[in-house]
Image (tube, grey):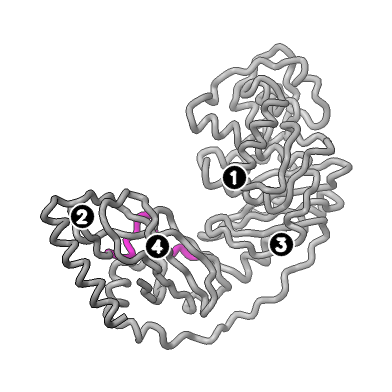
Amino acid sequence: MRVLFRYLRPRLLPVMLLSLVLAVPQALAQGVPTPQTMIPAPPQIAAKSWFLMDADSGRVLVEHNADERLPPASLTKLMTAYLVERELDRGNISMDDMVRVSENAWRTGGSKMFIEVDTEVSIRDLLYGIIISSGNDASVAVAEHLAGGEAPFADLMNQHATRLGLHNTNFTNATGLPHPEQYSSARDMALLSRYIINDYPEHYAVYAEKYFTYSDIRQPNRNRLLWRDPTVDGLKTGWTTEAGYGLVASAKRDDMRLISVVMGTSSEEARAQETQKLLSYGFRYYETLKLYDQGSVLSTPRVWGGEKNDLRLGVDEDVHMTVPRARNQELSARLDIRGDIAAPIASGERLGTLEVLLGDEVVGEQPLVALEAIEEGGMFKRLFDEVRRFFSNLVGRWFG
C-alpha cells in the first residue's frame, strides 16, 4: 500500500495529515513551487580530506577524500572518551571513581595532563584531561583502568569502531601517538562524533570547556573556534608531524547542528579557518526540519486475526531531514506498507518504509514499525477474519 502526502509544517500532527490525504490524495500532488534557492559549489578546503554532515538527519553536505585512511593523531581520543562515557552511562564506573596512575601512564610522551605516578586521580578529572588538555597520560591511565592495559583497550576500541560502522578506522593505542597501523577517516570521525553527541548528551558539555586546571596547571582547549564562534561547542583537535593539523568541530544554530572534520591542514590557524568555511557554508545554504516525533502514528492498517482490527504504525525515533533553504515546500512523504498484515505482531516489528522526497528525489528513508503488540484473537475471531481476508484478497485480484 502506498500513500502520498504533503509535508505542511514540522509540528503538524501526522494523524490529522494522513486523514486529510486519504480523503483528497489527488489534490496533494499539485502546486509544487519552483525552487528559489541557488546553492553554489562547496568551498575548497586546504586539507587532505574534509567532511560536513548534519548531526540529526545524518545528511552529508560536503565531502572530499572522506574515506581516505589517514593518521588521526589526537582525534583518536574521541573514541577513548566515548568508551569512558559509555561505561559511565552503563553504571560500570562513576565520575568519582579513583584511578591509580601507573609509571607507564606517567611516562607517556606528547601532550600531558601532568598526572603523577602512584597518585590517584578521579575519572572526572581524567575525562576532562583527555578532552580539554588532550592528555596522553590521562588516556593511558583510563585504558589501563578499564581494560587492564593499552593493548586490550585498543582491541575494545576497534570492536566498537566495527559496531558503529567506522569502516576505515583501526586503533593501536588510546592516545593517537604515531603507529603505522593506526588510521581513521574524516567520515568515520564525523560518525563517531555524532554518536558522542547523540548517545551521551549529559557528558557533551565537557567538549565546550575552554580551560582545565589540574595540579595548579591551567591548560587551554586547543579548539580555537570555542573563542571565535559562540555556536561551536566541540569536539577535538589533533596534531602530529605525520598527520598534520586536524579538527573535528560541531556547532548548533537555532535547531540545526552540524559536524565538520578537516584532516591534514598546515597549522592550528588553518584548521580553524577551514573548519569555519565548512560550517558557514552548511548553515548558510541548508536547514534541518523535524518532520515527526518519536512514536508518531502515520497509519493504522487493518490486521487480520488479531485481538484488535487496526494497528498503530509509525516511527520509533525522531525523523529529521536536511534540505536546501527555502525548499521545504517541495517535501513530500510516501508510506510503503506491507500488505495483508496478520497477527501476531510484535511491538517494534518493521512493516514498511517511510520515504521522504524532495521533488521527485528520495532524500531519506525511515522504517515504519508497529508501535504496539497485537496478539492473536480467539478461534472464532481468527476464523471470521480468515473468511473476510479471503474475499478481500479475491476482490483485490479482480480490481487490482
Sequence order check, earlier mark of 1 and 2 = 1
Say which residue appears at 73% left-offset and 50% top-offset. Answer: 185
Q: Amino acid at mark 3?
A: Glu
Picture coordinates of residue 80 (x, y %)?
66, 34
What is the spatial separation of the Cα atoms under label 1 and label 2, in whole angstroms? Answer: 37 Å
Spatial distance from mark 3 to mark 1, Cα to Cα?
20 Å
Callout 1 secondary element: loop
Mark 4 or mark 2: which comes first in sequence?
A: 2
Residue 340 seen in the figure: yes
First in sequence: mark 4 vs mark 1: 1
- Disc 4 to disc 3, how far (Cα)? 31 Å
| 111 displayed left or right of 99 | right
Q: Which residue is mark 1?
A: 164
Of helix, strand and loop, which one carries label 3? Answer: strand
Mark found first going from the N terminus, 3 or 2: 3
Q: Which mark is residue 352?
A: 4
Residue 71 to residue 68: above or below: above
Q: CA distance from mark 4 to mark 1?
A: 24 Å
> Range of the magenta residues?
289-300
Q: Secondary structure at mark 2?
A: loop
Contact between marks 1 and 2 (CB within 8 A): the answer is no
Q: Which residue is mark 2?
A: 306
- The amino acid on which the numbered mark 4 sits, given as a three-letter code, is Gly
The residue tagged 3 is 63
Q: Residue 103 at what x, y percent from top left?
A: 77, 15
Kindly identify the residue that appears in the image at 20 percent across and 57 percent down.
Answer: 305
The residue type indicated by label 2 comes to Gly
